[in-house]
Amino acid sequence: MKISEKINTAEETTFTFYGGNLTTREDVSFFEDIDLMTKLLFEEEIIQNPIRNLNISLVYDCELEDPAVALREDLGIKEFEEDLEDEMYEMLDQKKTCDEIANKFKVSVESVRYNLLTKYDDPCSLNIMEIENNRIRVLDDYWIGNEKMLNEKIFSKLHSDIYEFEFDIRSFIAKYMGNALTEDDDNAVIRENFNNPRWEEHNSMLFLQQDDVPYLLSLKETIGDKFKLILTEPNDVEKNKLDEIGINWGTDDKRIL
């Protein structure tokens, strides 16, 4: 885990963390990575105070497949000559690795993987925290377990114009694919396709739990009376509970449509 981009000024706070390649690392725990990311983040002193421009993201390289061979130009990969490619396929049939093939023919491993297997590494980004207008969106996985520290380090320093809170579930955006990592469950793909059996399911704030109540109340105290929790599709039980404990809430109709 390392910081791959950092802008830390009086006007902007942007941190991009790079977690490596989920295929080659193997046996990755998301929550262990989040702990490492948190340690690195709070070794930095955020200059903005109050905070009004914040973006924190985590990027992994993920091995995806391009069956239409549509990304060659984006990736800057040229086709091999037919005879050369035939020799490479022979080595592949002999169970040689892409590294071995690349070394023999003095080409990049990336070009071998793409030309022979249509596989490529796509940087897949996960939003941890971002501010848009008067709202801060926070990854629910990141909030759960870090509530007190985030109140102290981030939320207590937010500009008074930022008072709406929305919790996001874990969902990756692939750079070259241009949309979600998969149409299915990202976490299942990372566990099964990328050989990371310890990769955990997400801790969702989509459904309010009793244990969340004291932290939400603390969050409200930190932000002030304007605090508003933005929900996607709250059920009646959640609505009643929030009303009961005095948490102002609303829905984002644009996200429901």
Image (cartoon, grey):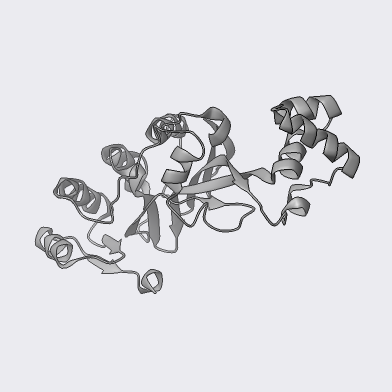
The image quarter in which residue 252 lies: bottom left
Q: Is residue 252 left or right of residue 10?
A: left
Image quadrant containing the C terminus = bottom left
How far across and how far down the image is residue 144, in percent? Answer: 28, 42
The answer to whether residue 46 is seen in the rendering is no
- The residue closer to the viewer here, 202 or 223, is 202
Give the total of numbered labels. 0
Question: Which residue occupies the foreground of this view, 249 or 173?
Answer: 173
Residue 2 in the figure: left or right of residue 236 = right
Q: From this view, report whether residue 96 is shown above or below residue 48.
A: above
103 up-or-down from 245: above or below: above
Nearer the observer, 179 or 100: 100
Q: Quadrant of residue 160?
A: bottom left
Q: Measured from the top left, where is residue 70 in percent x and y?
A: 72, 57
Q: Residue at x 45, y 53 (%)?
A: 130
Image quadrant where residue 114 sits = top right
Vertical order, 94 against 229 (above or below): above
Q: Residue at x 9, y 61 (%)?
A: 244
Q: Position of residue 41 (x, y in %)?
A: 45, 34
Residue under the image location 30 percent in, 69 percent down? 251
Residue at the location (56% across, 34% down)?
A: 23
Please provide percent x and percent y for residue 181: 52, 51
Is residue 111 visible to us here? Answer: yes
